[in-house]
Image (spheres, helix red, strand yellow):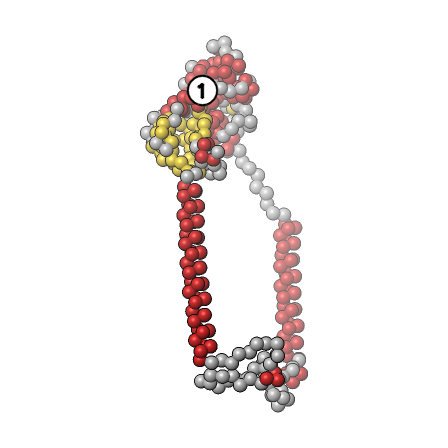
């Protein structure tokens, strides 16, 4: 007999599984009969009878299983849910031992901190002694009278006075393989025209590149926009809802109350699960979804928008 045992060890109150098992046996129903009606396996029904929820999904799903089980065997749903709440509350109140840090670990940390502090003090003393004892006259200083300053000059080039139209080049210092032309006003105009033309070409190329980048960005945004969809869900009854997009991101994950209207958008395809499908109405991109076609028992599970990714 599976019963809930309270911490004081004196009062024994039947758990929800025991209450359902008694009602099932009074109606001469087998676990297989219950499993067929509420879309579970016989082993899961036996686990509910034994209040063994270790292999069950989340607590919300377990509440739905117990509610459907109670409806089938004629037990008030509130009695079963209250018994389940007492069972969960009793398990949550079991104290958890708190491990205290060992004294040896604390001493070890203190010793490490002390060693680091001593090492830092010794390092400061050594650096201060070196700074005081090393004479300044041993440090190498630049002698301004030892010679002329070194100037990084390019060979073969001389300064040209401002305003002159020709360069006074030393022919012996110029590589004979180079084709050196005298600079004249006509050559200066040709060079300026060539520089201006190159600048205009560079500006036009940059403008074309910017236009191509903007066009590619707009095309990418248009493609991304085609991979999303909009859901509109109306609730006439309370229902647990789990909605996730193509990346597994949870768009909606809770029990939604009757009367709520929820709009969701996400990357396709989008998967949906409802714990009480009879109380839900769904539209995808303005078109209604046939919920009964995806309903099994009181649950419904289906995916929308799969054709977008094909």
The residue positioned 41% from the left and 58% from the top of the image is: 207
Closer to the camera, 171 or 243?
A: 171
Query: Which residue matches tag 1?
Result: 297
Res. 82 visible in picture: no
**Residue 139, horizontal then vertical, whole percent:** 65, 82
**Count of number-bearing discs:** 1
Q: Say if 39 sits above or below 190 in the image.
A: above
Outermost residue to the left: 259
- Residue at (52, 12) in percent of width and height: 30
Q: Residue at x 45, y 21 (%)?
A: 296
Q: Residue 73 at what x, y percent from top left?
A: 45, 14
Q: Position of residue 141 (x, y in %)?
A: 63, 84
> Residue 199, located in which quarter of the rendered image?
bottom left
Helix or strand or loop: what does disc 1 sit on? loop
Between residue 283 and residue 9, name the one nearer to us: 283
Quadrant the N terminus occupies:
top right
The answer to which quarter of the image holds residue 303 is top left
Front in this rendered view, residue 7 or 139: 139
Q: Residue at x 63, y 75 (%)?
A: 128
Question: Residue 251, relative to residue 300: is it above or below?
Answer: below
Q: Residue furthest top?
A: 28
Left or right: 264, with 175 as reference point: left
Res 127 visible: yes
Where residue 291 appears, x then y in whole percent? 40, 24
Tell me the quarter of the picture where residue 258 sits: top left
Residue sticking out furthest to the bottom: 145
- Left or right of 282? Residue 135 is right
Vertical side of 223 occupied by 13: above or below: above
Q: Is residue 88 above or below residue 104?
A: above
- Label 1 neighbourhood size at 10 Å, few (<14), some (14-19), many (20+)? some
């Amino acid at each position: 007999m599976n019963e809930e045992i309270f911490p004081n060890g004196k009062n024994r109150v039947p758990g929800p599984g025991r209450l359902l098992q008694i009602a099932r046996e009074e109606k001469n129903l087998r676990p297989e009969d219950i499993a067929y009606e509420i879309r579970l396996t016989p082993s899961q029904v036996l686990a509910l009878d034994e209040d063994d929820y270790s292999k069950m999904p989340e607590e919300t799903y377990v509440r739905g299983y117990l509610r459907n089980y109670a409806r089938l065997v004629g037990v008030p749903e509130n009695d079963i849910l209250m018994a389940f709440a007492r069972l969960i509350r009793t398990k949550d109140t079991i104290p958890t031992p708190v491990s205290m840090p060992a004294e040896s670990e604390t001493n070890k940390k203190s010793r490490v901190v002390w060693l680091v502090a001593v090492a830092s003090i010794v390092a400061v003393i050594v650096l201060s002694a070196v700074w005081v004892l090393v004479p300044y006259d041993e440090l190498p200083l630049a002698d301004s009278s030892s010679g002329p300053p070194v100037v990084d000059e390019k060979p073969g080039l001389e300064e040209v006075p401002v305003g002159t139209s020709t360069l006074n080049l030393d022919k012996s210092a110029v590589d004979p393989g180079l084709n050196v032309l005298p600079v004249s006003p006509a050559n200066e105009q040709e060079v300026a025209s060539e520089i201006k033309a190159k600048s205009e070409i560079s500006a036009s190329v940059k403008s074309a590149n910017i236009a191509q980048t903007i066009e590619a960005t707009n095309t990418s945004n248009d493609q991304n926009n085609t991979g999303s969809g909009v859901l509109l869900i109306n609730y006439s009854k309370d229902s647990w809802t789990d909605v996730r997009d193509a990346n597994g991101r949870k768009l909606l994950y809770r029990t939604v109350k009757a009367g709520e209207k929820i709009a969701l958008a996400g990357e396709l395809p989008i998967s949906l699960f409802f714990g009480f499908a009879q109380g839900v109405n769904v539209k995808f991109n303005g078109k209604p979804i046939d919920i009964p076609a995806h309903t099994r028992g009181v649950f419904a599970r289906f995916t929308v928008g799969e054709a977008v990714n094909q």
